[in-house]
Amino acid sequence: MKCIGSLRDWDGTKIAHKIKVETLLINGSHDEVHDISVTPFFQQIPKVKWAQLPNSSHMGLWEERERYIEICALFLGHNKTARDTNEKQ
């Protein structure tokens, strides 16, 4: 994948530490957003949770709908168990 648009040189990891709200990162194991791309955000954002959908690409909401909704519900506090997520406090 090659970026050619006006954001091609933008790097959000340089300002990710400024995000002060709890943040949920989700990617799929077959996603074009690989773990190597998510990791810097996970390391920089102070209050972050990261979940990976093992059977999804970039469309986890459709490919693993039940699990995706469960992860979002956990993140939003509808259940206190944080199964299958990495968490930093």
Image (cartoon, grey):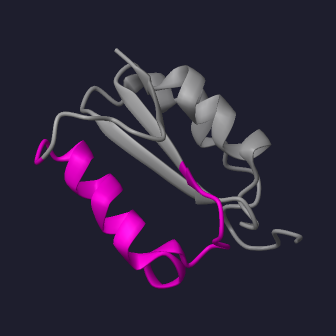
Q: Quadrant of the N terminus?
A: bottom right
- Residue 80: percent from left, percent from top: 17, 34
- Residue 30: percent from left, percent from top: 76, 67
Question: Which contiguous range is marked in magenta?
Answer: 52-78
Question: Disc count in the image?
Answer: 0
The reply, left or right, for residue 36 in relation to residue 54 is right
Q: Residue at x 65, y 42 (%)?
A: 38
Q: Is residue 13 above or below residue 6?
A: above
Q: Is residue 47 above or below residue 24?
A: above
- Give the residue furthest to the right: 2
Depth check, front residue: 69 or 4: 69
Depth check, front residue: 59 or 23: 59
The reply, left or right, for residue 57 in relation to residue 76 is right
The reply, left or right, for residue 76 in relation to residue 50 is left
Depth check, front residue: 23 or 28: 28
Q: Is residue 66 magenta?
A: yes
Q: Residue at x 58, y 41 (%)?
A: 12
- Give the residue furthest to the left: 78
Q: Is residue 55 magenta?
A: yes
Q: Residue at x 39, y 39 (%)?
A: 83
Please identify the quarter of the rendering in which residue 4 is found. Answer: bottom right
Q: Quadrant of the C terminus?
A: top left
- Residue 42: percent from left, percent from top: 55, 30
- Give the residue furthest to the top: 89
Q: Is residue 10 above or below residue 41?
A: below
- Residue 25: percent from left, percent from top: 47, 47
Please identify the quarter of the rendering in which residue 43 is found. Answer: top right
